[in-house]
């Protein structure tokens, strides 16, 4: 029996569209429910410090209304830890965050931020919230995550996906090797391994064949494709692509 590969759907950019005009439409909570009905195993939402898309009330409504785990992406700050401890999501993924960036750029520097991360992670772990660090597939970062007692890491797949988009075969091979080796190392250290950033149907199918990875978190591509075919259809197609990739594990 091949282990089920979980799909977490990020609904941030439903809120981006809502906020472009104000008001309450489209509703990210409704999008979360549609994604779950279509096959998502959980929902991810990034509460940024500038609240550019997801808002505090969205987190409260998601926690109250969805029937699957809520993964709260957030910067590693005192304010965000306090919000997480109040909201009590199933999971928290600590990510780097800069005000000027369009999206999350690169992985969290767990090595450089070790001293500041430790007490935050202790608080979240003590509260029973599953903590994940969104990091590059770098051995030093992965080892530090394990030393910080992070139960989970999420490998940043952005560089690999960017290389695929530009058909840079050398970079594709190098980044894929780094991801595969990083996933193997993380699992050997007792970490649960997730992956995300920039994934589409094809790249998700490819990475699904790595048996160490148990969850993919995907948002921007799904919401973009939903513009043309609907969110239910995009989630179903992504679920099918991941299942095809996971089936290759047995071959």
Image: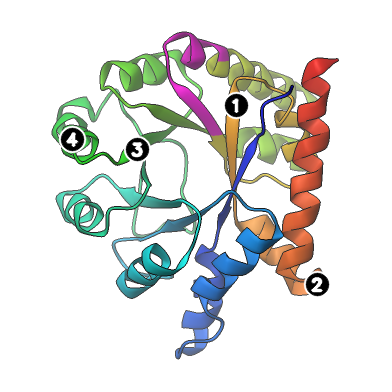
Which mark sits nearer the N-terminus, 2 or 4?
A: 4
In this view, 212 is above or below 105: above
Q: Secondary structure at mark 4?
A: helix
Q: Is residue 23 left or right of 56 when viewed as pictured? A: right
Is 39 positioned to the left or the right of 29 in the image?
Answer: right
- In contact (CB < 8 Å): disc 3 and disc 4: no
Q: Quadrant of the C terminus?
A: top right
Task: Report which residue position mark 4 lands on.
Answer: 126
Res 166 seen here: no
Residue at (59% x, 48% y) in the render: 41
For the residues labelled 2 and 3, say whether their Cβ atoms are less than 8 Å apart.
Answer: no
- State the CA–CA distance, disc 2 to disc 4: 43 Å
- Write the start and end of the magenta stretch as one range: 184-194
The residue carrying mark 1 is 213
The residues tagged by marks 3 and 1 sit, at their Cα atoms, a distance apart of: 16 Å
Residue at numbered disc 2: 228
What residue is shown at x 48% (from left), y 8% (from top)?
Answer: 188
């Amino acid at each position: 029996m091949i282990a089920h590969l979980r799909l977490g759907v990020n609904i941030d950019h439903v809120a981006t569209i809502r906020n472009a005009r104000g008001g309450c439409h489209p509703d990210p909570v409704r999008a979360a429910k549609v994604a779950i009905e279509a096959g998502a195993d959980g929902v991810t939402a990034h509460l940024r410090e500038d609240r550019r898309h997801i808002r505090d009330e969205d987190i409260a409504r998601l926690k109250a209304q969805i029937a699957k785990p809520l993964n709260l992406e957030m910067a590693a700050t005192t304010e965000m830890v306090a919000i997480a401890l109040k909201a009590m999501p199933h999971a928290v993924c600590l990510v780097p965050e800069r005000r000027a960036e369009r999206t999350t750029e690169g992985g969290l520097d767990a090595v450089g931020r070790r001293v500041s991360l430790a007490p935050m992670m202790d608080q979240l772990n003590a509260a029973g919230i599953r903590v994940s660090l969104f990091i590059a597939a770098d051995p030093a970062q992965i080892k530090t995550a394990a030393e910080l007692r992070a139960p989970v890491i999420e490998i940043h797949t952005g560089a690999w996906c960017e290389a695929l988009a530009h058909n840079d075969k050398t970079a594709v091979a190098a980044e894929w090797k780094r991801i595969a080796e990083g996933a193997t190392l993380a699992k050997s250290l007792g970490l649960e391994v997730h992956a995300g950033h920039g994934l589409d149907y094809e790249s998700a199918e490819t990475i699904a064949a790595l048996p160490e990875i148990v969850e993919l978190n995907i948002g921007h591509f799904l919401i973009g494709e939903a513009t043309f075919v609907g969110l239910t259809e995009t989630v179903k197609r992504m679920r099918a692509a991941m299942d095809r990739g996971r089936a290759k594990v047995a071959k």
